[in-house]
Image (cartoon, rainbow, N blue to C red):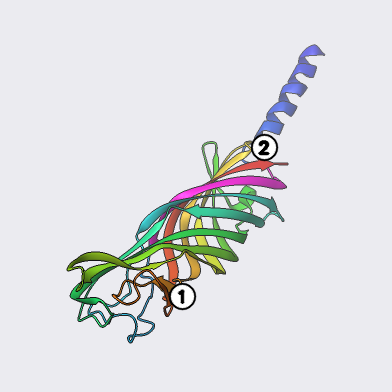
Amino acid sequence: MKRIFKFAILFLFSSTCSANVFSIQKPTWFAKFDAGFAWSSNSGISNPDPSFWDAANQGYDANLGNRSFASIGLGATLNEYLNLDIDYTRYATFNYQQYQTGSSVTPGFSGNARTRFFDLNVQSVLLNLTAHPNPNQFGLHFYNLVIYPFASLGAGVGINRMSNFHTVAYNTVATSGVVSSLGKDTTQNTFAWQGSLGLTFAPVQSYLAADIGYRYYDGGDFQSPNQIMANSPFEAGTLISAPRWQGKLKTNQIFLVIRFLAT
């Protein structure tokens, strides 16, 4: 009888393990931490007013550089196929630098070359909906991992702050290189969205999961200040009105997300 009882216990235990060996936890809530790298596209800036800003052979459009980013978020599992989360993302500072040639019409300048600069500080708050197949039915079971694809769309607000806006050029009066077009920091809150594709790696019977994938992020619009500090002989040190530059932030990204699951 004891042997039969022990055998029954072992059978139930082994059956339970076998039933769960390829299952993953079904969380209600999760926290996530995201890190990655973003490659920016050209900013789409064009000369807003050639009578104020110098014409340039190279134009005003330029790349903003490639930067890292990190985010934190909270989410919930809606069902076996959908997750909903909200996240906050902060990027390392993007930098604009455009060398230009062409005759200057700006008062106080006569050289045929100048370089424009600004920094772009980028943040976002997005609401994301993620779809995936039922991992317990359609996931790829590899050792102690369940692997399955996902697709995500998100939308929210992008917070884009332009700072350090200035130009370095040649001045006819000082006969030297000078800094001009100094402008105050300008923040623009704008519509932003993202689309992502990737793979989820979920260890069996674990409360951790990792997402690896590609994301396209459209951070929306940004703009320059509408006043700059003049350095012409008659207006040096005074603020004058200036037509704003308008640009857009668009990036291609790779990312890694670590999710902490809670039932």
Mark 1 is surrounded, within 10 Å at the Cα level, by few (under 14), some (14 to 19) or many (20 or more) other residues, namely some
The residue positioned farthest toward the right in the image shown: 1
Spatial CA span between label 2 and label 1: 63 Å
Foreground of the two, 111 or 13: 111
Q: Main secondary structure of the magenta part?
A: strand
Say what amino acid the circle numbered 1 marks. Asn
Say what amino acid the circle numbered 2 marks. Asn
**x, y percent for residue 114:** 23, 70
* Region of the chain picked out in magenta, as a range: 25-39
At mark 2, the secondary structure is helix
Left or right for 18, reference 172: right
Left or right for 33, reference 14: left
**x, y percent for residue 41:** 37, 67
Residue 24 visible, this angle: no
Counting residues from the start of the chain, the first of labels 2 and 1 encountered is: 2
**Which label was assigned to residue 226?**
1
In the image, which is nearer the foreground, mark 2 or mark 1?
1
Residue at (47% x, 63% y) in the render: 185
Mark 2 is surrounded, within 10 Å at the Cα level, by few (under 14), some (14 to 19) or many (20 or more) other residues, namely some
Foreground of the two, 232 or 61: 232
Could you tell me which quadrant the N terminus lies in? top right
The residue positioned farthest toward the front in the image shown: 234
Left or right for 144, reference 137: left
Label 2 belongs to which residue? 20
Q: Is residue 102 magenta?
A: no
**x, y percent for residue 201:** 53, 45
- Residue 226 lies, with reference to residue 159, above or below; the image says below
